[in-house]
Image (spheres, rainbow, N blue to C red):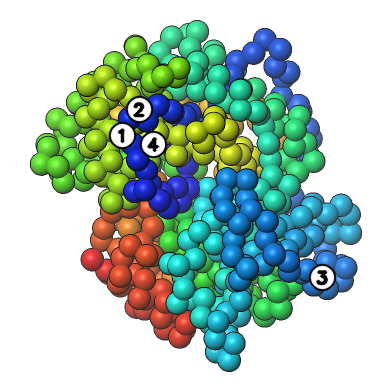
Amino acid sequence: MSIRVRMTVLAVTGLLVAGCTSGGNEGATTAAPSATTAPPATTDAKPSEPAAVPPLPAALTGQRPDWKRCEAPESGQRPGPEWRCATVKVPLDHAKPEGATTPVALIRKEATDKGGRIGSLLFNFGGPGASGVDILPQAATEYAKLGERYDLVGFDPRGVGGSAGVVCRDDAEQAAAEASVDLTPDTAAEEAAYLKDNTAFGAGCARRSATVLPHTTTTATARDLDLVRQVLGDDKLHYFGMSYGTQLGGTYAHLFPSRVGRLVLDAVVDPTADTAGHARHQTIGFQRALDNYLKSTGEDPKAGTRRIARLLKKLDREPLAVGDRRLTEGLALTGIAVTLYGQSNWPLLTQALAEAERGRGGALLELADYYNDRDAKGHYATQSHSQRAISCADSSERPTAAEAKALIPEFRGLSPVFGAFLAWDTAGWCANWPVQGERSTPEASAPGAAPILVVGTTGDPATPYEGAEKMAKELGDGVGILVTNKGEGHGAYGTSPCVTKKVDAYFLKGTVPAYGTTCS
């Protein structure tokens, strides 16, 4: 039910939205209310603090990956023979490196220019919860130039996909939740059902993924990254993080500043924002992107926002039937939000809104399905499960329903479309989560680290530009190098030729742009 910080639109422009009859749940993070749902499992297990931990044993640092031909992912084609897959073991708890281990799945395509090879370049595509093993082969054409001199390496962070992926519910529970749970509750009964459902989601995670659930923090994954770096034979970590991947990159730089090689952070999460702060930023960011979209159509942004808000209010009262499913307010919000991740998707929004206003909800429903990883057969992927497990292991904050409701007037003022939804999300996201969170905000200071490129896009809805400014400052003088992309969408590499050129020059030649460089 959350518009989190995932790099979600890799191929939305390929959707055929006309005449579709399917839909999905906002972020796929709510569970069906059930009288038989057990209360959340409680545990005293608290994710390890990022203080000094014991050294890793040679049995882990001396691993040699057994690279083999990759199998096809659950919802995709088998990568070509140039891609090889392997699994390495990392400590389940880095505070106990001699204890139990957990797998980290890797995929690699070796550099084509063997003589000019620089090293390995690891990618994280956001989420949290995105599978680098699945995504990197699909997106690799964008990184072909980098792949000449780097081994391109994707990985599933702990708790994701092939790395002991968290599972919290089945397809039937997800489908029931999206059909019955109001994501902007207006009555006491709707509020109780909303909170009960979110509690049930956490309980499902605890039942199905009890072993890994307390250990899915970004801090633990950053430590995994350093072990992977060693196993791959690299002295420094070269890394490209997008969206949530920028938080992971900042955390790595904070923990291991002397091991930072060439790092790029694109579509940057604000490391200084708490739960309410992130929600406030996204309320502003998505409304800003919506305003820019409306301007591009020639419609006054205020009038257009009122029009869309009226549609959502109508759907809240009376969802649109689409086959044997319904377009609810929450699903419509998802469909609208997903198109704002990239300017090339805006025509889809025009079409989908026009159809919904004429009583046909299929287009918005299909867009929501895309975001929610729901296929035509009604099967949901589990990225949203991992997303929530990582987020709630990271954050120690657990806002109450009263605190969420107190935000609604302010948030509605910032965005009549997204405000109430994002205010409620602060309480629903980690409601009664069965594992304690690590801290209120992550650490990103990295004194002494090599320069890190921090790329922010002025029209980014999910990670607004201001977050890049904050990250560059937090990394420290001479470390965080701010690059501003004047444009739309979530992420600049591959869409802005100027940004792409500067990032390529940095990765391939070590050329560091001046702080404050602007691309337009």
Could you tell me if residue 471 is visible in this image? Answer: no
Check disc 1 and report its element: helix, strand or loop. Answer: loop
Question: Which sits in the foreground, 241 or 44?
Answer: 241
Could you tell me if residue 278 is visible in this image? Answer: yes
Distance of label 3 from label 2 (alpha carbons): 50 Å
Residue contact at pointers 1 and 3, CB within 8 angstroms? no
Q: Where is residue 358 in the image (x, y as percent from the top left)?
A: 22, 21
Residue contact at pointers 2 and 4, CB within 8 angstroms? no
Mark drawn on residue 18: 1
User: Hey, what amino acid is under mark 1?
Assistant: Ala
* Residue that extends furthest to the bottom in the rendered view of this protein: 115
- Using a 10 Å C-alpha cutoff, classify the residue at mark 3 as few (fewer than 14 neighbours), some (14 to 19) or many (20 or more): some
Residue at the spot of label 2: 362
Question: Which sits in the foreground, 243 or 411?
Answer: 243
Closest to the camera, between mark 1 and mark 2, is 1
User: Hey, what amino acid is under mark 3?
Assistant: Gln
Closest to the camera, between mark 1 and mark 3, is 1
Mark drawn on residue 367: 4
Mark drawn on residue 63: 3
Choose the circle earlier in sequence order: 4 or 1: 1
Check disc 2 and report its element: helix, strand or loop. Answer: helix
Residue 429, relative to residue 508: is it above or below? Answer: above
Closest to the camera, between mark 2 and mark 4, is 2
